Image (cartoon, rainbow, N blue to C red):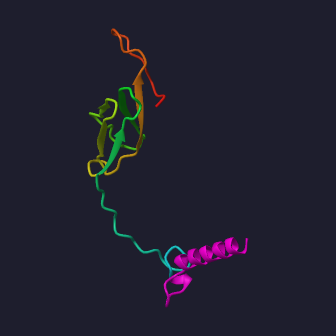
Amino acid sequence: MRKIMTGLAAAAVAVLVALSPPSGTSAAATPGAGGGLPSRAAPAVAVDHTVTFANDTGKTVWIGSDVNNDGSRPLAALPTLEPGQSGTVTIPETAEPGHWRGTFFARQCAQCGGFTVTFHSAV
């Protein structure tokens, strides 16, 4: 029990040291600490990211996505994965509006015969 408590105390000290202002400055001069003026951070540069999906279900999977109502653009040409396949989707964060926020989901065909196709998201 003593070793656990010593380990927790050391971790707490490490967190406090990481959060403390650099030496030679006071908390009042640290931006966001309540005393000084906040400095303007350089704008973040958007980069495209990729997400890779792997199908380990033994059935065909259709990848779908939905976007938030914040100007994010819908994704097109999402992959259909046969059993054992993987596919990569590029998230267009460098295109307008400069971000993409949404969710991905996988669908399997429950009834693939004839013209009636129903999907379920049980994956």
Q: Nearer the viewer, residue 1 or 36?
A: 1
Q: Residue at x 72, y 75 (%)?
A: 2
Residue 1 in the figure: left or right of residue 72: right
Residue 34 can be seen, yes or no: no
Q: Residue at x 60, y 73 (%)?
A: 11
Q: Nearer the viewer, residue 25 or 113?
A: 113
- Confirm whether the magenta stretch covers residue 13: yes
Q: Quadrant of the N terminus?
A: bottom right
Residue 80 in the figure: left or right of residue 107: left
Q: Residue at x 34, y 63 (%)?
A: 44
| Image coordinates for residue 40, horizontal then vertical, percent | 39, 71
| Image coordinates for residue 42, horizontal then vertical, percent | 34, 69
| Image coordinates for residue 86, horizontal then vertical, percent | 31, 38
Quarter occupied by residue 39: bottom left
Q: Residue at x 70, y 73 (%)?
A: 5
| Image coordinates for residue 41, horizontal then vertical, percent | 38, 70
Secondary structure that dominates the magenta span:
helix
Q: Nearer the viewer, residue 52 or 26?
A: 52
Q: Nearer the viewer, residue 21 or 85?
A: 85
- Confirm whether the magenta stretch covers residue 41: no
Task: Tell me the magenta residue range.
Answer: 1-29
Q: Is residue 60 above or below residue 88?
A: above
